[in-house]
Amino acid sequence: MTAAEIVRLMNLEDRKVAVAVARELPAIARAVNAVVQRIENGGRLIYVGAGSSGRIAVLDAAECPPTFGTSPYLVQVLIAGGKKAMTQSVEGAEDRSRDAVRDLKTAGLTGEDVVVGIAASGTTPYVLAAIAFAKKRKALTIGVAANRHSPLGRAVDIAITPEVGPEVLAGSTRLKAGTSEKLVLNMLSTAVMVRLGRVYDNLMIDVATTNQKLRERTTRILMEASGKNLSTVRHALRQSKHNLRVALVMLKRGLTANAARQKLVGSQDHLRRALGE
């Protein structure tokens, strides 16, 4: 095949992924509601995976603090083989069931937490052991696999199983299966954060201002969210010590920074509630 033929074939196969994920939307929505309930009761979202699936989970979890202003404690990842496995293959790590139990114990798993097992085949021993231990601890369990009838799908409370079909490169689940996992985790974490009030409309109201580009973005976000001019927005940001949600409550409710903070405290930091919307 020519290069053009190869990439055209891959593109045709990739189009099947969104269709497969669409069939799982009801299950994803159930998972979102369940995760929100657990987090509101003090729980955490813990991804568990191995190999490509684990690395996709790492990517999703790592983006939550800068995007939604969450603590790294809230969305965590356990990957078979530990930190080394994030950048390279760790031989045999996915088969070590005992490591999964050890890792969850180290993470201090409780019955309020949610454990999401991610495995394209749905048969990874590390992931299955994590789910079994999580169920013993009364944690909510969710499974993400490309195989509807897998052991993982049968073991969890909520199964999300987009069946994407054979890979264009046989057995290379980093392709369609991996893409489906990325789409599912994108939906899961984003929808959870929306429901928790970590965004305003479609704006990243809690984006971390760690560089000049992001500091400029926060100003634009606040202008769009509040409808105020640049000068007014900059003043509110200074008064709020560059806390976007405090500044937005100030601007939309006509409050001082201290009063805006009290509104947020009284609403358990839920922005919409603080705004009375």
Image: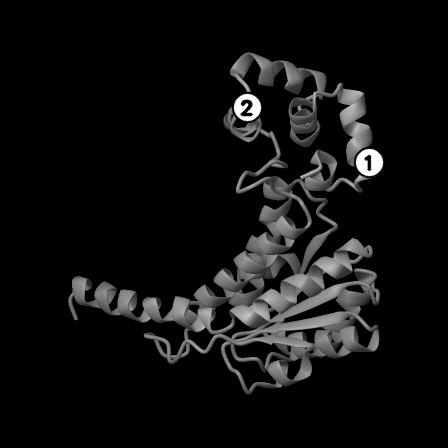
- Callout 1 environment at 10 Å: few (<14), some (14 to 19), or many (20+)? few
**Earlier-in-chain disc, 1 versus 2:** 2
Locate residue 115, reporting x and y percent: 71, 67
- Callout 2 environment at 10 Å: few (<14), some (14 to 19), or many (20+)? some
Q: Say which element carries label 1.
A: helix
Query: Of the numbered discs in the image, which one, if any, rests on residue 220?
Result: none
190 or 99: which is nearer to us? Answer: 190
Residue furthest to the left in view is 2
Indicate the colouring scheme. Answer: one colour
Q: Determine if residue 263 is in view.
A: yes
Locate residue 120, reporting x and y percent: 52, 75
- Badge 1 vs badge 2, beta-carbon distance below 8 Å: no
* Quadrant into which the C terminus falls: top right
* Quadrant into which the N terminus falls: bottom left
Q: Examine the rendered structure and indicate whether residue 166 appears above or below residue 197.
A: below
User: Along the horizontal axis of the image, is 185 left or right of 79?
Assistant: left
Q: Examine the rendered structure and indicate whether residue 246 appears above or below residue 229.
A: below
> Type of residue at label 2?
Thr
203 or 118: which is nearer to us? Answer: 203
The mark lying in front, picked from 1 and 2, is 1
Residue occupying the point 58% across, 67% down: 28
Marks 1 and 2 sit apart, C-alpha to C-alpha, by 23 Å
Q: Determine if residue 173 is in view.
A: no
Residue occupying the point 53% across, 57% down: 186
Q: Say which element carries label 2.
A: helix
Query: Of the numbered discs in the image, which one, if any, rests on residue 265?
Result: 1
User: Along the horizontal axis of the image, is 58 left or right of 103?
Assistant: left
Locate residue 12, reporting x and y percent: 27, 69
Tell me the residue that label 2 is attached to. 219
> Type of residue at label 1?
Val
Locate residue 147, reporting x and y percent: 51, 82
Residue occupying the point 84% across, 65% down: 110
